[in-house]
Image: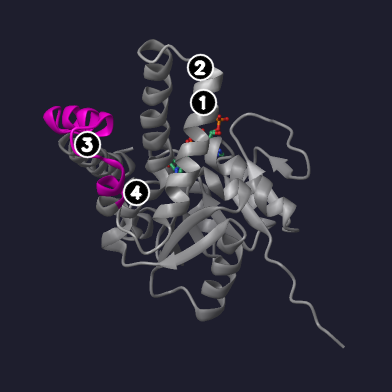
Amino acid sequence: MIIMKARKRIGIIGVGSIGSIIAKRLISKGYKVFGSRKAAFKFKGMNTTTDNRYLIENSDMIIIATKQKDIKELAHILRPHIGQKPVLSLMAGVSIGQVERILGGTKVVRIMTNIAFGSGQAISAFCCNKMVSASDKAAVKAMLGTGGDIIEIEEKLMDSFTVLDSCAIAFYSTLLNSVNVSASKTLHLDPRLAKWIIISTMRATLEKASGPVTFEEMIRQVSTKGGMTSAGLKVFAEMDLYGVVDKAYEAALKRGLALSSIAEQS
Ligand SMILES: NC(=O)c1ccc[n+]([C@@H]2O[C@H](COP(=O)([O-])OP(=O)(O)OC[C@H]3O[C@@H](n4cnc5c(N)ncnc54)[C@H](OP(=O)(O)O)[C@@H]3O)[C@@H](O)[C@H]2O)c1
């Protein structure tokens, strides 16, 4: 006889942009999900409530997917009722130590993912405090694994991971949007036709880059000396595109620090 291990019931406090994506994915994979939001709302397939105490009572692990400023308010409900249930904090910039201080000595897992969780194509990272047991960790991995690949990383790398994983979807979309806008403005192409060409070319670029070739080698392969590509690349270099990316990443990391103090002060 095969004994199926029951899936954990997941409570998600904060069913906003990312919380709702995670909820939908988990539901599609057969998890029982409880979601809360300040205002009453409906969500197909999910048990919803505005009562976080009720959510905690009916869940085996709790994901906090609210903004950083909301954690202190949540502490009043979480502290007395959380017991041995692991708390998974998705709040960017907020450390395990901070969550421990705010919620009291409890099982804390810091997690990070991106919106590709919804299609099972995300990379999600996690790190745990010492109170998290091996079986808790296995349950966290199973749950995060529904959204794609998972890695356990040192907490000191979590902000960097956030920039390269969670923020990156917006960063890449900004770069691609700038290409799309320029394609119609400067190259005089229909925006929809341009978008189709951009996506096809980007897909081919990523496909090739997935092999052993480096990005630098790919640049060299395409840029004929004195050709059109080289002329365009010269402008990227003159405008210091790499420096711009450095500055954007630095700004994102700095904001992570600010968000962490918002959680502490709120
Ligand atoms: N967006 C992303 O791609 C992403 C990726 C990784 C991590 N994160 C992190 O995830 C968190 C949420 O980001 P988001 O973009 O999803 O923000 P969001 O869309 O503003 O969602 C936050 C949600 O929290 C709810 N909320 C606030 N206080 C609550 C309470 N006491 N009880 C229950 N629900 C409460 C809000 O409900 P109401 O609308 O009813 O006020 C809102 O739906 C942030 O800490 C962020 O750093 C985001």
Amino acid at the residue labelled 4 = Leu
Q: Which comes sooner in the sequence, label 1 or label 3?
A: 1
Q: From mark 4 to mark 1, how far is it between C-alphas?
A: 24 Å
Q: Nearer the viewer, residue 254 or 150?
A: 150
Q: Nearer the viewer, residue 108 or 120?
A: 120
User: In this rendering, which labeled residue sits more in front, label 2 or label 3?
Assistant: 2
Extent of the magenta region: 218-241
Q: Nearer the viewer, residue 246 or 145?
A: 246
Q: Which comes sooner in the sequence, label 4 or label 1?
A: 4
- The residue tagged 3 is 251
**Crowd rating for badge 1 (residues with CA inside 10 Å; few <14, some 14–19, many 20+):** some
Question: Do the residues under discs 2 and 3 have CB atoms within 8 angstroms?
Answer: no
Q: Which comes sooner in the sequence, label 2 or label 3?
A: 2
Amino acid at the residue labelled 1 = Lys
> Regarding mark 2 in the picture, which secondary structure is present there?
helix
* Residue 132 relative to residue 226: left or right: right
Q: Which comes sooner in the sequence, label 4 or label 3?
A: 4
- Quadrant assignment for the N terminus: bottom right
Residue 54 seen from this side: no
- The residue tagged 2 is 191
User: In this rendering, which labeled residue sits more in front, label 4 or label 3?
Assistant: 4
The picture places residue 192, in percent across and down from the top left corner, at: 56, 19
- The residue tagged 4 is 164
User: In this rendering, which labeled residue sits more in front, label 4 or label 2?
Assistant: 2
